[in-house]
Image: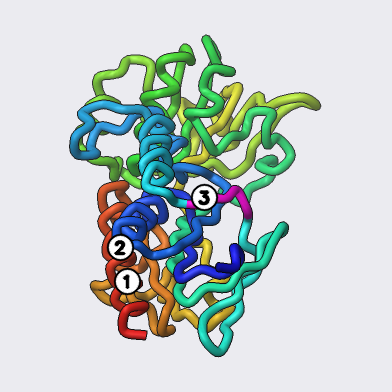
Amino acid sequence: MDDKKYELIIVGTGPAGLTASIYASRYHIRHLVLGTIFGGTITLASEVENYPGFPHISGPELGQKFLTHAQKLGATVKNEEVIEMQKEKDGFLIRTRENKYQTKALIIATGTERRHLGIPGEGKYLGRGVSYCSTCDAPFYREKIVAVVGGANAACMGAIHLAKFAKKVYLIYRRDRLRGEPAWVNQIKKEPKIEVIYNTNVTAILGDDNKVTHLKLDHPYQGKETLTADGIFIEIGGIPMTTLAKTVGVKTDEDNFIITNEMMITNIPGIFCAGDINSSRKHYQQVVIAAAEGATAALSAYKYLHEK
């Protein structure tokens, strides 16, 4: 059989995509998995404490377990970025920078990309005090002052992880209470290094020629409009990566998330969707949900292929 032709292609190598691969292997579907972040964005989490069977595991380790499991069952997983999707008479054409593939069915599990603040200094100091990954960069801020922007789980987890290295962590949130799970919020309250600044936005990132030195705030804090900081970690959620899906006619909601039914079926026959990119779970993005949706999408793909 042509090694560029598949029954199913899964775009995305996070928990949703890799779980879909695990189930596709068990259904004996000849498939290919394409993506660039093996394990997905869960690999950016320092700690995971709510995935069944693992009371405590690091994000990178959990992501690796997903990948290893999929490969053990025979999945072909390639580190290739999909740059184009086309509808064909009997399926779809998928192009990457390296190859082009044909498939009868498609599961889109591309997830989200990090949302930016869009303020002065954010781009200028990227990698020089501005970061979107506390797990990756926390060790560089040992005994320094840092700030985390956000109030949901990612921001809370990031602040807790940074407190293991930094001497002071400011958690800056635009609302009057954190939105993270109670378990994370309780840890925030118990950590003496973390100070939460509510009802406040960072409006500019300031620094010298080399690095971040201060943050400008829209409300004075302790009588000052700027906050001394060596680094800022932006943890304000993600933007769904749906541009390619929309080029083949997949419908999205008002926030650009893909619309599916309960079986992960989109409006385009042969295209399924799972994970954080899915509209039905956009307000509660969890690994366990992404995995469940990946399994469901694989089942739907199997039924679709069997019927064809």
Residue at which label 1 appears? 302
For label 2, count other residues whose C-alpha is less than 10 Å away and answer few (under 14), some (14-19) or many (20+).
some
Identify the residue at horizontal 37%, vertical 22% (top origin): 194
Quadrant location of the C terminus?
A: bottom left
Q: Which residues are magenta?
A: 76-80
Quadrant location of the N terminus?
A: bottom right
Q: CA distance from mark 2 to mark 1?
A: 7 Å
Nearest-to-viewer mark from 3 and 2: 2
From the viewer's perspective, tell me whether residue 172 is left or right of residue 115. left
> Going from the N terminus, do you reach mark 3 or mark 1 first?
3
In the rendering, which numbered label is found on residue 238?
Answer: none
Residue at which label 2 appears? 27
The picture places residue 280, in percent across and down from the top left corner, at 30, 67
Is residue 197 visible to us here? no
Residue at which label 3 appears? 77
From the viewer's perspective, tell me whether residue 279 is left or right of residue 252. left
Question: SS for tag 2?
Answer: loop
- Residue 262 found in image quarter: bottom left
For label 1, count other residues whose C-alpha is less than 10 Å away and answer few (under 14), some (14-19) or many (20+).
many
Q: CA distance from mark 3 to mark 2?
A: 17 Å
